[in-house]
Amino acid sequence: MTAPHAPVLLAEVIEALAPRAGDVIIDATFGAGGYTRAILAAGATVIALDRDPTVQAYADAVANDFPGRFRLVRTPFSGLAEAFADSGEARLDGVVFDIGVSSMQLDQAERGFSFMRDGPLDMRMGDEGETAADIVNTWDHGPLAHIFKLYGDERQSGRVATAILRRRVEKPFERTLDLAAVVEKALGGRRGAPIHPATRVFQALRIAVNDELGELRAGLEAAEAALSPGGRLAVVTFHSLEDRIVKAFLTERTGNAPGGSRHAPVAIETRKPSFTLSFKGAREAGEAERADNPRARSAKLRAAVRTDAAPWGAFGGRIAA
């Protein structure tokens, strides 16, 4: 099968993972298999994870092209450690995450991710749990406004929540374009604005439906626990909420968390760093890739190498309102 979209920062991700024959690498966001195919082409074995049932056809094609070195596990990030344990492999040499919604999910109107195509108001990456329709039709004003502000950075989150509550009394929300129209009206249309008025609200709902930030934290913790010494971690993010979590995790785990002031003594950290950075900061797509692939414009790659220190366990980094 032909992949529906090009994987972002592919060359940079493969450089960070440095896959070799005999390595075992987890592609935690299989999608259409872009990263997986490049890793397999280098001779490594891939354990792919994805909670989206619609990726099975791409997985079947990969398994046919690389027999014996590929398997797909239906699980979110939080199931990473269990998936590796169940694989029976002795060591884990790399983990890659590509965070957020994929272009092929956006292109499927029936998935309900896009405010540009009419479809059921779903937004689930898997096939279980609360839908976006459930949230907008049942949540109170406060929680709705909170996620619009926190996950979407919508400045008029309260106004949008009020408009949703008023409309749902008359008729529950079922379709994407219906919700998009209500949001657009609540925000005054924003004619000439660089993005559609519903962009931030739809992003916030998608993140809430799929617990994307919670799954990211759980995935990072699981990767730390599962990676063998010398194993490589590569994480591609697409907006600031994701990148802040990854940056905070690696800052903490590399022992580079900022200290306190001279007026506030800092507790001595006795744990050894569990990662070393592969490079400082984040790498971004080059001009050519940004021109060819609009999704690459906001992409950032951070990478690190696992040390032989014990895993730190639960990650305390949180996103404040």
Image: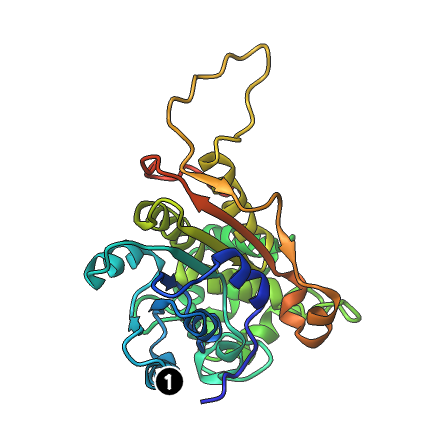
Instruction: Reply above or below: 258 against 78.
Output: above
Left or right of 291: which side holds 276? left
In the displayed orientation, state which residue is furthest to the front. 21
Q: Which quadrant: the N terminus? A: bottom left
Q: Going 25% across and 61% down the picture, which residue do you hit?
A: 83
Tell me the amino acid under the disc marked 1.
Asp
Which element type, helix, strand or loop, lies under badge 1? Answer: helix
Asked which quadrant contains residue 202, the reply is: bottom right
Residue 251: give x, y in percent of width and height: 52, 37
| Residue 76 seen in render | yes
Left or right of 198: which side holds 228? left
Q: Going 23% across and 55% down the picture, which residue do you hit?
A: 90
Scheme by which the image is coloured: rainbow
In the displayed orientation, state which residue is furthest to the right. 192
Q: Nearer the viewer, residue 166 or 49?
A: 49
Residue located beneath label 1 in the image: 65
Q: Nearer the viewer, residue 167 or 236?
A: 236
Q: Going 80% across and 70% down the picture, which residue do you hit?
A: 192
In the displayed orientation, state which residue is furthest to the bottom. 1
Instruction: Reply above or below: 198 against 97.
Output: below
Asked which quadrant contains residue 184, the reply is: bottom right
| Residue 163 seen in render | no
Q: Nearer the viewer, residue 60 or 24?
A: 24
Residue 134: give x, y in percent of width and height: 38, 68
Left or right of 221: which side holds 99? right
In the displayed orientation, state which residue is furthest to the top. 263
Tell me the crowding category of disc 1: few under 14, some 14 to 19, or many 20 or more residues within 10 angstroms, Cα based.
Answer: few
Residue 315: give x, y in percent of width and height: 39, 39
